[in-house]
Amino acid sequence: MVNIRLNLFIPFSFLIYLFINCKSNILESSNKPNIVIIYTDDLGYGDVSAYKKGTLKTPNIDKLANEGIRFTNGYSSSATCSPSRYALLTGIYPWRNAEAKIITGGSLIIDTSQVTIPRLLKQNGYQTAIVGKWHLGLGLNEIDYNSKISPGPNELGFNYAYIMPDTQDRVPTVYVENGKVVNLDPRDPIEVDFKTNFQEQPTGKANPELLEMKWHHGHNGSIVNGIPRIGFMKGGETAKWSDVDMADHFLEKTKSYIKNNKDKSFFLFYALQQPHVPRTPHPRFKGKSGMGPRGDAIVEADWCVGELYKTLETEGIIENTLIIFSSDNGPVLNDGYYDDAVEKIGNHTPSGGLRGGKYSLFEAGTRVPFISYWKNRIKPGISDKIISQVDILSSVAKIIGTEYKSQDGKDLSGLILDNLGTGRNELILEATSRTAYRHGDWVMIPPYNGKEISKNVNIELGNSKNYKLYNLKDDPSQKINLSNKNLQKLEQMIDNFKRIRGVKNTNTKDLILE
C-alpha cells in the first residue's frame, strides 16, 4: 500500500533525478513542444470512425487519426478508470498498488513524491494543467469539501487543476479548482456519505417521481438535476454543476488555459467525461447520433476535440503541439441507467468486434483508440505495434530531452513521433485487480473465480476455471481457446506472466486466482 502520509520523505533516487534535470531546463523549454493528452471516458475501439469498425461518425477525432498515427494495438493499462489514470500519469502498472482501484470518495492514490507526467514536465520548464475528470482520490482521509483539499492534482505537479473529484455519477456533484470547491457558499456546507443518507434528503430509490433519468443498478442515491447518483450529498447548492453544460464548461476552461499559456511550453491533460454515465449531452446534440444519449455524448466529445484543435490553430501553436488521444478503458452500454444505449445501438459496434468491454480481461476492455498527432511533424500512418498508456511518461520524457524512465513504461517516442521501432513485445493487462498477459500476437488469461458474465452490464469478464490462450493475429475476436492445443506456448506464457507478476505458485495446473 502506498503511504501518502509519508510524503515529506522524498526517495534519494528522486532527489538525484531532480538534480540532474533542473540545471537549465527552464531556459531550454521554449524549444520544446506543447503536449496535450485528450483522454475520453469509456470510449470503445469501434467508437472512433477512423478505425472503420462502427457506424458512428467522429470527424474531428478522425482528423487526428488520419493525419497522425493511428495505433491498432494501443492499450489502456486497465479496463476501469482509476487504475488506468494511475498508470498513465505514473508509468507504473496499477496492480502494483493495492489502492489503485475504482475510487468512490477515497484518498489520493498516487504518492506525492512520485514522478508523474506533470511533475516531470514542470521540472523541465512546462506549465501544467488538468481540466476534466480526476478520479484518483483527494486528500488523506475523509475529505472536507468546505476547506482547501490537499493533497490532490496540484501536489502531483499540476500548476492548474479544474476537475470533478470522481465521476459524473458520484457525489459530490461539484467542480474543484486548485483544491477549492467552486462557488461554494460557506453558509451551506457540503456533507458527503457513501453509506448512509442524510435526514429528509430525497434519493433515487425512495423518490422515483423526482427522476428525469431512471436508474438501472447502483445509482439510487442523492438526486441532482433529476439524476440519481452513487452516494449521498447534502448542502453545496450554489456549487452544484449543470450536467448538460459540463462539456461546454470544461471546454471553456481548456480554451482559456491554452490562450493564457500560448507563449510558454505547456502540458494539458484534457480529461473528458464522455461517454461515461450519466450521459447528458447538451440539448443541441440531442438526436445527432440516432443512438440515444451515449451516441450523442460521443458526437459532443468529438465536437469538443474539434474546438480544442481550432483553439490551438487560432492561437498559432498547432504546429508546435503534440496531441495524444486515447480512452481510459473500453466501452459499456448499460452502466447503471436506462438511457436507450442498448435499445438504440443499431449496427454500431463500440467494441469494434473485439470480445468483452469495460471491466473485462478480454481485448475490448483495454484495447482502445490510441492516436498521436503533431501537424507537419508526424507523418500520417497506421501502426500495428503494441503500445500502452503506461509508456507515455517514459516516451514524453525522451521527447523533451530527458532520460527518465518509469518503472513499467517503455520509451516508445520513436513509435509515437515517427512510426519507427518494434513497440512492446509484452504487456500485462488489468481489469478490477485481475491480470492477463500479452506477448506478441498471443494473449493468456489465467483462471479466475467469479462470474463469467456481469449481469448488470452484460459483459464477459474473462473469468473461468481454466486457462485461456488466444492468437490475436488469427483470431482477434478471441473465439478460439488454444490452451489445450498448444500446451508448450501456454507454459511459456504462464512462466513469463509469473516473472512479471511475481506469482510464486509453480504448479500452473492449480493456479486459480481470486
Image: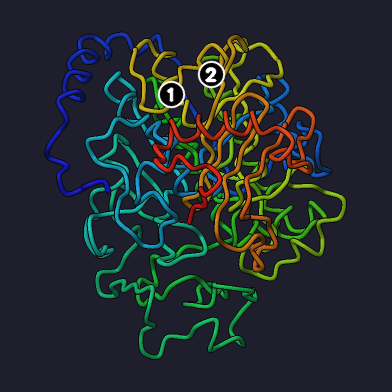
Secondary structure under the numbered disc 1 in the rendered image: loop
185 left or right, relative to 481: left
Of residue 159 and residue 407, the one placed in the foreground of this image is: 407
Alpha-carbon neighbours of circle 2 within 10 Å: few (<14), some, or many (≥20)?
few
- Give the numbered dot on residue 316: 2
Alpha-carbon neighbours of circle 1 within 10 Å: few (<14), some, or many (≥20)?
some
Which quadrant of the figure has residue 67? top right
- Position of residue 152 measured from the top left corner of the image (x, y, whole percent): 29, 47
Amino acid type of the residue tagged 1 in the rendering: Lys
- Which residue does the image show at 52% across and 20% down from the upper left? 322
Q: CA distance from mark 2 to mark 1?
A: 8 Å
Determine whether 324 is above or below 276 in the image.
above
146 left or right, relative to 392: left
- Position of residue 396 measured from the top left corner of the image (x, y, whole percent): 43, 20
> Can you identify the residue that label 1 sits on?
262
Of residue 237 and residue 45, the one placed in the foreground of this image is: 45
* Numbered marks: total: 2
Which quadrant of the figure has residue 388? top right
- Position of residue 465 measured from the top left corner of the image (x, y, whole percent): 61, 55
Query: Mark 2 near mark 1, Cβ–Cβ under 8 Å?
Result: yes
Amino acid type of the residue tagged 2 in the rendering: Gly
